[in-house]
Amino acid sequence: MAAFFFGCDQFVARELEEKARLEALTDKVIGAHGENHPELRQIGEVFQRLCADLKPHMSKEEQILFPYIIETENSALQNRPAPFAPFGTVSNPVRMMMMEHDTVGDLLRELRTLSSNYTVPPDGCISYQTLYQAFETFEQDLHEHIHLENHILFPRAIEMEGNH
């Protein structure tokens, strides 16, 4: 499980770097093409909402949920009692994280729809192309991250807590 968390740390670091790059690139493309492509302003707003949702979500994972899961696993491996769960059971924050994942999925779908599946219009410059390619990669990374949490980490954490 430690390798999974190392991967999560790498994802968070990449996400923070990519978020800053995408914000600047979005502003540049809106400035150059926003008049002819008003959907870009909506895309910028949706991306900002996505980033605003991701920031506290990742913070809760990094500061509360993941440390609890790691401690639960370490306790199980060392035959120690399970750690105190300030949230009652791990199922409670997991349920909240999954609801937040659903919100992220909705925002990603909205980005994809507004951008016509990341299709750059004929008058789009290289920055426009770069932005849409980066959005698509960002989306794929988020889907992979969410899949790993929802289908591997969270079920394992719930099972571990139940067996401990």
Image (cartoon, grey):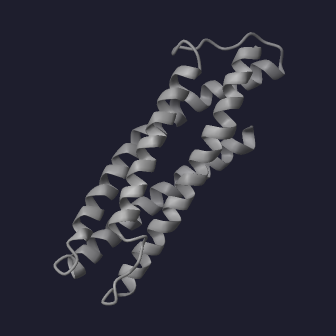
- Total count of labels: 0
Relative depth, front residue between 156 and 19? 156
Horizontal and vertical percent position of residue 163: 77, 15
**Residue at image coords 79%, 19%:** 76
Indicate whether 105 appears above or below 80: below
Where, quadrant-wise, is the N terminus in this rendering?
Answer: top right
Q: Residue 65 lies in what quarter of the image?
A: top right
Where, quadrant-wise, is the C terminus in this rendering?
Answer: top right
Horizontal and vertical percent position of residue 5: 66, 41
Indicate whether 27 appears above or below 78: below
Horizontal and vertical percent position of residue 159: 72, 23
Indicate whether 136 appears above or below 100: below
Residue found at the very far left of the displayed protein: 35
**Residue at image coords 42%, 56%:** 108
**Residue at image coords 76%, 18%:** 75
Indicate whether 143 appears above or below 86: below
**Residue at image coords 30%, 56%:** 46
Relative depth, front residue between 67 and 110? 110
Horizontal and vertical percent position of residue 93: 51, 25
Relative depth, front residue between 115 and 86? 115
Q: Residue 151 lies in what quarter of the image?
A: top right
Locate residue 106 relative to residue 27 in the image: left or right: right
Q: Residue 84 lies in what quarter of the image?
A: top right
The answer to whether residue 19 of the structure is visible from this angle is yes
